[in-house]
Image (spheres, rainbow, N blue to C red):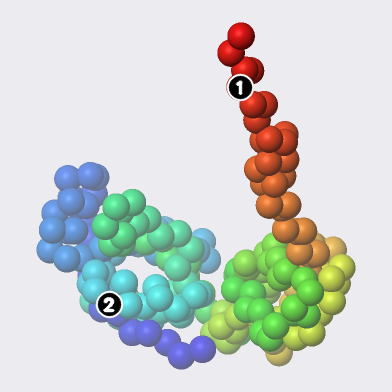
Amino acid sequence: MSEVRIAAEQRTEFGKGAARKIRRADKVPAVLYGHGIDPKHLTLPGHEVLLALRTPNVLIRLQGEGVDELALPKGVQRDPIKGFVEHVDLLLVKRGEKVTVELPVIAVGDVNPDGLFDQQLMSIAVEAEATHIPTGVEVDVEGLEVGASITAGQLDLPEGATLIADPDTLVVQVIAKQAEAPAEEAEGEEAEGEPAEASAAE
């Protein structure tokens, strides 16, 4: 995994007012923690952070006055309406160390047309080297028949990744298609026959 370099400024103002001021300048407040250090409060360029976070488990090289560290995003707060990044928690990492991350599960291929593909797990927890985190885990579903399933323990993990999730966790399965609903019971059996003829007048 390549590093994304982002300029970082240390900040000394805290609280909601300070955070709003930072966001108005198109920047993002962030906190860097880990390895027993005192948390570092940072300000990052908003657009660069938004682009970086498009990659799952992106490795970020923070550089600035008093800052030159590698970090992984561990918590991202976004505006619920506009979607822009409001705050980022960053985990300090070192080359060679192992970290636990969630990798996206990517299905490849098509199941047998008699069945329906059902993906139960969209991401899976693995341990990997901090500077060599895989982009995802592929699972081959080509031609799987109805009733077939694949668990976490059956996944072919990328080199260097170790499964953390329960190996019995269901990842994907193929279920039977539901039978088509009968066509509205023939309109109530055609209104239960012909309507009775009007009685002849006496």
Q: Is residue 7 left or right of residue 146?
A: left
Judging by the rendered image, the residue that carries numbered circle 2 is 48
Q: Which residue is painted at 40% across and 76% down in the image?
A: 54
As rendered, which of 184 and 148 lies closer to the eye? 184
Residue 35 picture location, percent across and down: 52, 66
As rendered, which of 90 and 146 lies closer to the eye? 146
- On residue 198, which mark appears? 1
Under mark 2, the amino acid is: Glu
Disc 1, SS: loop
Q: Is residue 101 left or right of residue 193?
A: left
Residue 27 picture location, percent across and down: 20, 65
Residue 165 picture location, percent across and down: 74, 64
Under mark 1, the amino acid is: Ala
Q: CA distance from mark 1 to mark 2?
A: 81 Å
Disc 2, SS: helix
- Quadrant in the picture for residue 159: bottom right
